[in-house]
Amino acid sequence: MFNFLKSNKKYEPLDKELRKYFENNFLWLMQEFPEPKIEERKILTPRASDFPVKWNKNRENAIDVLKIICNNMQLDPNEIKLDFYDNGLKEIDTGASVIFTEQDPDSPEAAGLYHHEKVDGKYSISLDEALLERPDSLIATIAHELSHVKLLGEKKLEQNDEMLTDLAAVFFGLGIFNANCAFQFYNQVDRWGHSSLGYLKIDEWAYALALFAFIRHEDEPEWKQFLSATIKSDFEKCLSYMIKNEEEIFKFDDENL
């Protein structure tokens, strides 16, 4: 008698237009960067075997990370100039507690910056010094800035597209870090707050990662164990949707072709 409480509406992750945006751009990335094949691309995880870095919160860590990610993205680290600036956390004293948050990613004071012009044969990226305190965020930010190098530096795009840049980080095997760092909440004895990185929302990261797994024919990818609880839950729902509705994935209306 309570069937009226149950919804017959089929679960669909994101809206159709946004899903097709991700699917179309994944196909574009596969076309622009055909080697190695997407099934053969290495996915980097927080394991020491992927990042054999002795973390001591100094700039050498950032250089080590840069070299590892460059190798995964088929970039020459000798063509990347890395420098740092002081931005860090901004605090708001509410009287009862202190809230601290990152800068708006649309701000010129974001966690990382890519400088569009190549100088002396090198691409230049800048990082917030505060990232050295947080290895996952450091990795995610470098992945995002190097994705700019792949898209803008290698002249695959004429105009910047930040959502596509985040998607490229997934394509190049860094999606675990960028998705996990999309939103982080922390609670300490005398303060609480959150940090965020990137331009995609959590459900959008989940769909992008699921699409990556779907293309690679991974029904149960081993690497999903490294996703945060929230991302992992949404990821599993998205991947399940794709597997059950395989005929709808990469199906485009004529006007969208």
Image (spheres, grey):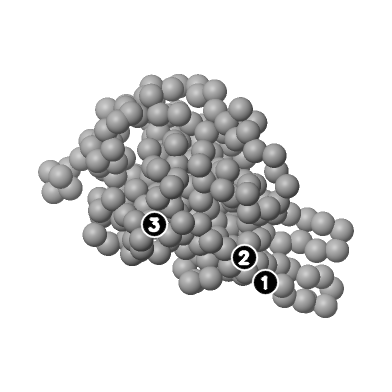
> What residue is shown with label 1?
90
| Mark closest to the chain's N terminus, 3 or 2 | 2
> What residue is shown with label 2?
102
How packed mark 1 is, by other alpha carbons closer than 10 Å (few <14, some 14-19, many 20 or more), is few
Tell me residue 10's x, y (percent).
Answer: 40, 36
Tell me residue 50's x, y (percent).
Answer: 57, 31
Front one among 214 and 42:
42
> What residue is shown with label 3?
123
Front one among 72 and 241:
72
| Placement of 41 over or under 189, stated as above or below | above
Identify the amino acid type marked 2: Glu
Tell me residue 237's x, y (percent).
Answer: 49, 34
Identify the amino acid type marked 3: Tyr
Q: Choose mark 3 or mark 2, whichever is in front.
A: 3
Give the residue drawn at x 78%, y 56%.
Answer: 187
Give the spatial CA distance, label 3 vs label 1.
29 Å
Front one among 107 and 13:
107
Element on which disc 3 rests: strand
Identify the amino acid type marked 1: Lys
